[in-house]
Amino acid sequence: MFLIIGVKLDMLGAFYFGFEMWHLELITGLVVLISSSRSLLLKTWPDFAESSEAANRQILSSLQPLDYIVVAVLAGISEELLFRGAVLPLLGMNWQSIGVAAFIFGALHIGAGRKYSFAIWATFVGLAYGYATVLSSSLVVPMASHAVNNLIGGLLWKYTSKQK
């Protein structure tokens, strides 16, 4: 069963805003992979933990819990439209292109207290989202995964951070 949620993305005709039931499994797998990996890195890589804390403090500290949903969804949609909806199709639909788009995604996550460790992490995440986009031919998959992962990370930070 194929349900079209939106219209075909004209950028090289590569991806749809479509959803098939198996995409839900892919989204769930991405959320588990990325959120659990992030949790492990926060506990084992001090530089990554420091970078994440700095970014979260800067972006999230003044938000109310419901605001986290808006921020997570807007970041998920906008970043995925740019990197997986525009950059990836321009580069091509292969592993090299997924890697280049992921590297750019990672590099643009440096700054605002985030160090090279955060860029490495964002590159890994970009690889996962890029692969999922090509596999599913749908931008809904990385958008939903990105938004849910951001929401989980933000809420966990909000309720476990020592600097509330």
Image: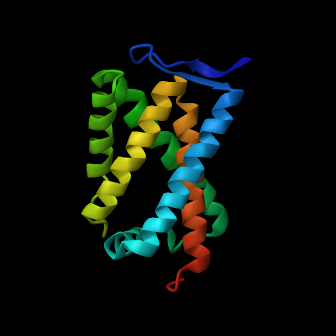
Quadrant where the C terminus is found in the figure: bottom right
Quadrant where the N terminus is found in the figure: top right
Q: Where is residue 75 in the image (x, y as percent from the top left)?
A: 49, 49
Q: Where is residue 33 in the image (x, y as percent from the top left)?
A: 53, 51
Asked if one can make out residue 26 in the rendered structure from this viewpoint, the answer is yes
Quarter of the rendering containing residue 155: bottom right
Mark count: 0
Residue at the (51%, 45%) spot, across then down: 76
Q: Position of residue 159 (x, y in %)?
A: 62, 77
Quarter of the rendering containing residue 14: top left
3 versus 121 height, above or below: above
Residue at the (49%, 85%) spot, across then down: 163
Q: Which residue lies furthest to the right in this view?
A: 1
Position of 55 with respect to 147 (left or right) is left
Position of 123 with respect to 129 (left or right) is left
Q: What colouring method underlies this structural image?
A: rainbow
Residue at the (51%, 40%) spot, across then down: 77
